[in-house]
Image (tube, rainbow, N blue to C red):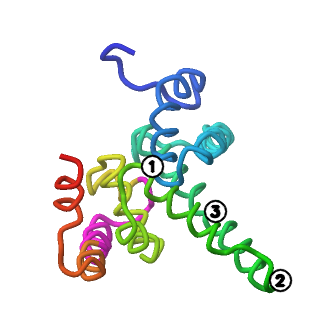
């Protein structure tokens, strides 16, 4: 679209899909890896379509609204995966946990995150992780994160600060962005 305002979901959902699907797909791939991205993006738009009549442009723009839905879909996906891992662990020996751990690590590090950083991000409480990744991967402002997750602006700041502090501590006091830039640049 050229300079026009973004389409409203209740009126022109096909245009909403065309404008934002690739962006939501990239976000899902950065969060979960390319294998899950298509399913997550499709589920996000299915839920958005079902909720299109309740969309409130006063609360958030369409992009922010979609990222909020995507973040919730990703959270459900991760919880389901955790339940499956726990169920597998209860089955006892014979399951190759290391192999699955390697797959999870490679998915989390899909966009350049490496070992320790990926594990540190995965260990964050869900609220902190969601805020951090919306800022880092979707380049959201505090206002956009607040609208997407339905939390206050102050909560965004405190969760982001806690997440960054936890990551620095987990990485031995180093700045993970500096480390990534040094590794890639």
User: From the viewer's perspective, is the residue at label 1 or at label 3 nearer?
Assistant: 1
Within 10 Å of disc 1 (Cα), the crowding (few <14, some 14-19, many 20+) is: many
Q: Position of residue 99 (x, y in %)?
A: 64, 67
Q: Where residue 156 sits in the image (x, y, percent)?
A: 31, 66
Asked whether disc 1 touches disc 3, contact meaning CB atoms under 8 Å apart, the reply is no
Q: Earlier in the sequence, mark 2 or mark 3?
A: 3
Tell me where the magenta segment starts and ends, as one range: 148-163
Sequence-earlier tag: 1 or 3? 1
Residue holding disc 2: 91
| Disc 3 residue crowd, few under 14, some 14–19, many 20+, Cα 10 Å | few
Query: How many C-alpha atoms fall within 10 Å of the one at disc 2: few (<14), some, or many (≥20)?
Result: few
**Would residue 124 be found to the left or right of residue 94 on screen?**
left
- First reached walking from the N terminus: tag 2 or tag 1: 1
Q: Which residue is mark 1?
A: 30
Task: Point out residue 170 in the picture as x, y percentages from the top left corner.
Answer: 30, 80
Whether residue 82 is situated above or below residue 52 in the rendered picture: below
Q: Nearer the viewer, residue 21 or 113?
A: 113
Q: Give the number of the disc on residue 76.
A: 3
């Amino acid at each position: 679209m050229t300079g026009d305002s973004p389409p409203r979901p209740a009126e022109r959902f096909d245009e909403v899909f065309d404008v934002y699907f690739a962006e939501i797909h990239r976000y899902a791939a950065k969060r979960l890896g390319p294998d899950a991205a298509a399913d997550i993006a499709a589920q996000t738009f299915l839920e958005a379509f079902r909720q299109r009549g309740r969309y409130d442009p006063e609360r958030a723009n369409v992009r922010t609204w979609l990222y909020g839905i995507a973040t919730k879909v990703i959270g459900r996906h991760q919880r389901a995966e955790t339940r499956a891992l726990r169920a597998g662990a209860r089955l006892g020996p014979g399951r190759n946990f290391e192999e699955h751990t390697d797959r999870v690590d490679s998915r989390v590090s899909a966009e350049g995150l490496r070992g320790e950083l990926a594990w540190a991000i995965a260990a964050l409480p869900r609220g902190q992780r969601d805020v951090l990744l919306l800022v880092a991967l979707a380049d959201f402002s505090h206002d956009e994160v607040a609208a997407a997750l339905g939390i206050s602006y102050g909560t965004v700041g405190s969760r982001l600060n806690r997440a960054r502090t936890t990551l620095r501590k987990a990485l031995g006091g180093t700045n993970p962005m500096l480390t990534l830039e040094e590794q890639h640049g």
